[in-house]
Amino acid sequence: SRFVAKPANGSGGGGILVVGEWDAERHGWRKAGGGEVTPLQLSRHLADVVFGVHSNQLEDRAFVEERVEPHPVFEALWTDGLCDVRVIVLRGRPVMSMIRVPTAESGGRANLHQGGLGIAVDLETGRTFRALHRGTAIERHPESGAPLVGIALPAWPEVLDVARRAALAVPLGYLGVDVVVDREKGPLVLEINARPGLEIQNVNGRGLGPETVLVRRSTLE
């Protein structure tokens, strides 16, 4: 009964509802990050999504997706939500990456604008080396206390390969691919972002400019 409801054209995490287990006594679902949602509240939320409340347009579509069972490495970062790995891909080449980690503040959503954490990942080694929360560098999750730096990510070559293949499947030269690692199924594409934003540069502590030059040179060669 664990699922996620989200708008097709939302941004910044708006309209994403992360739903946990069904509570028969309360006749509602437990929400990630605390609280609960009743069937009536879920119906109203889906109606808001369809009417474009979260996407600044007259109408939208709602997706209801099953919740992934995260790999233990990601579950240790935050047990009540789903961490994802955002990989920026430029002309088929991964150029920068970070993990987005939910908090209670973000309502179980892995969006930095909602209060989630960004953790920079070294593309070569698959290890985390820097973490940011609302513009401040941190080394532990502010709520769970879990360490954030020096973590070796599971199936890292496969994560990059999945992101690369997903990027090549769409007609975009620059995009962000969000990948999750299921404990049984391995790396899965959560979504592709045509406008992935630039906050990943702050998380990594460096800009994308040098990477674009390298990719341009390799393309010309």
Image: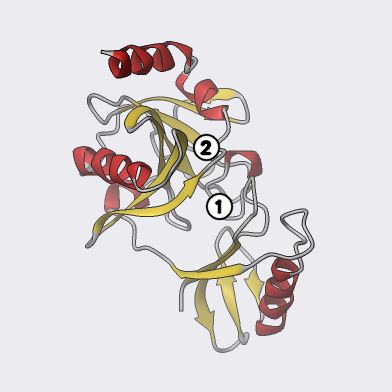
Which of 156/129 is in front?
Answer: 156
Look at the numbered disc 1 and give the secondary structure of its residue.
loop
Residue 57 visible in image: yes
Q: Identify the mark at residue 20; answer none if there is no mark.
A: none
Amino acid marked by disc 1: Arg
Q: Quadrant of the C terminus?
A: top left
Look at the numbered disc 2 and give the secondary structure of its residue.
strand
Report crowding for label 2: few under 14, some 14 to 19, many 20 or more residues within 10 A (C-alpha).
many
Residue at 53% over, 43% down: 143
Residue 198 higher or lower than 6, as above or below:
above
Residue 12 higher or lower than 34, as above or below:
above
Report crowding for label 1: few under 14, some 14 to 19, many 20 or more residues within 10 A (C-alpha).
many
Quadrant in the picture for residue 97: top left
Residue 8 position, x and y percent, is 59, 60
Residue that label 2 marks: 117
Amino acid marked by disc 2: Leu
Residue at 65% over, 74% down: 37
